[in-house]
Amino acid sequence: MINVIVFILLSIPILVVSWRSIFSIKNHGLYRFIAWECILWLFISNILFWFKDIFSIHQIISWILLFLSLYPIISGVYLINKAGKEDNKREGSLYQFEKTSELIERGIFKYIRHPLYCSLLILTWGVFLKHLDFLLLSVSLLSSVALFLTAWIEEKENIRYFGEKYREYMKKTKMFIPYVL
């Protein structure tokens, strides 16, 4: 019961941040919101297991994934913040820091198109591995599907904004994992 109360309380800020973009299935914000909620539920459900049996294989892999999830988000946000911002006519579901006027093709973006969602995907599975549970496996899978849908819909938005330049960029990069996916 306490998990549900904590989930509801911590969902409020996520809802406040996401409110303008969660009411359309054609908008990537809805699926991003679902992923965030899944990740929140995973954190809350697994909080008691973070430091139990720390030398088990699933805990070791979990910690590796959790630390690995930091690189894509840090480097992605850094490059997004450095990008041009003079044009704010981008989709309404983007946060202000995401509204770039230039297509970023350097740094981590040279290899993957969605480092922030990649980070959330790695985070999802890192948190799941803290405590293996069938229900949490389904939450992790839902989060992963939501992140794929988020990226897929955002790519359509980017094609509308950047046009053929984004299509060419898609041919040179992978969605989440360099050279693989």
Image (cartoon, grey):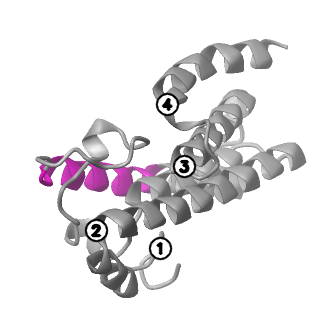
Q: Amino acid at mark 2?
A: Phe
The secondary structure making up most of the magenta span is: helix
**Amino acid of disc 4:** Arg
Magenta span: 67-84
Q: Residue at x 38, y 70 (%)?
A: 159
Q: Nearer the viewer, residue 19 or 125?
A: 19
User: Is residue 50 in view from this perspective?
Assistant: yes
Residue marked by disc 4:
20
Which residue was labeled with disc 2? Answer: 162
For the point 44% across and 42% down, the residue is 93
User: Residue 177 bears which disc, if any?
Assistant: 1
Q: Describe residue 68's horizontal placement relative to residue 11 as left or right.
A: left
Sequence-first tag of 1 and 3 = 3
Which sits earlier in the primary sequence, circle 4 or circle 2? 4
| Above or below, 166 relative to 29 | below
| Residue 27 circle label | 3
Whole-number angstrom distance, CA of label 3 to CA of label 2: 17 Å
Real-space Cα separation, disc 1 to disc 4, in angstroms: 30 Å
Q: Nearer the viewer, residue 95 or 48?
A: 95
